[in-house]
Image (spheres, rainbow, N blue to C red):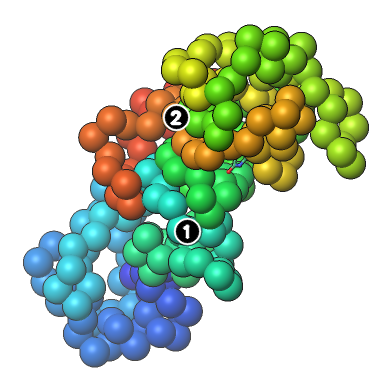
Amino acid sequence: MRLDKILQSQGFGSRKECQHLISRGLVEVDEKICLDAKQVFQTKGLEFKVSGHSYIYVEKVYIVLNKPQGYECSHQAVHHFSVYELLPQLFNVRGVQSIGRLDQDTTGLLLFSDDGQFIQALTHPKKHVGKQYLVNTIDPLTDDQLQQLQEGVVLRGEKGSFIAKDVKRLTENSCLMTVHQGVYHQVKRMIAAVGNKVSQLHRNKTGSFELPHDLKEGEWRYLSIDEIEQIKH
Ligand code: URA
């Protein structure tokens, strides 16, 4: 692929902007400054530098973020920070987006990608990908409330009933539960529907993929090929 196209695909700007970076001598491949925007390189595993910073070509981006509180999953966050501020600007330019959304006060596992098929596979309602949450409540969770969650609750304005799977009490005021749909404020509304209130919400898992334990709040990393496969299946 041509060098200007490579840079553009990786989020360095428009074709013109990338050509400008090249003509200014800011782009190195194999430790040599390349001034020819039309020069062709094999993209697989290509390592290059822009303004002295090293990059590796990636066809698509797949990342996991440990979302902190106080961040909204929108680009134009109004009342809080945007989760996109936690990612390199290059990812925003190449159209990386969050896979589903978490409320500003929810923490934990949030995936991002610019692979439309991958995003669709995880968010399509018919795919029923399970999301596991650690739920803390204001009032103690009664056995009856946990039972109702497992039997299914009705949410105002939504069709059908919403069931919590694999419900496990942890303490008087906390439990684990898995939901398979993804309607607005789903967990908070389910907890409200049984007469309690969420005080803290944390997502642990999407499908069988667990938030990596070594990823601190606010940190992100690339998913490995094995992890991408695990999430897909
Ligand atoms: N359910 C909610 O209520 N909030 C979230 O952020 C995620 C699931």
> Is residue 109 left or right of 181 when viewed as pictured?
left
Task: State the image coordinates of residue 205 (x, y, percent, origin top left).
Answer: 47, 27
> Is residue 107 left or right of 137 when viewed as pictured?
left
Which amino acid type is marked by label 1?
Tyr
Describe the element under mark 2 as helix, strand or loop. strand
Task: State the image coordinates of residue 56 (x, y, percent, origin top left).
Answer: 26, 55
The image quadrant where one finds the C terminus is top right
Query: Which residue is denoted by mark 1 in the rendering?
Result: 71
The image quadrant where one finds the N terminus is bottom left
Q: Residue at x 32, y 31 (%)?
A: 212
Residue 71 to residue 143: above or below: below
> Is residue 119 left or right of 52 when viewed as pictured?
right
Residue 16 to residue 171: above or below: below
Quarter of the rendered image showing ligand 1: top right
Q: Residue at x 84, y 27 (%)?
A: 154
Residue 223: quadrant of the picture = top left
Task: Please say whether residue 63 is visible from this viewpoint.
Answer: no
Task: State the image coordinates of residue 177 (x, y, percent, origin top left).
Answer: 57, 21
Which amino acid type is marked by label 2?
Asn
Tag of residue 204: 2
Residue 219 to residue 121: above or below: below
Residue 171: quadrant of the picture = top left
Q: Residue at x 44, y 29 (%)?
A: 204
How much space separates mark 2 and mark 1, taking CA atoms?
17 Å
Tag of residue 83: none
Give the class, few, some or many, for how many residues have Cα within 10 Å of label 2's Cα (few <14, many ≥20): many
Q: Nearer the viewer, residue 173 or 95?
A: 173
Task: State the image coordinates of residue 102 (x, y, percent, origin top left).
Answer: 56, 46
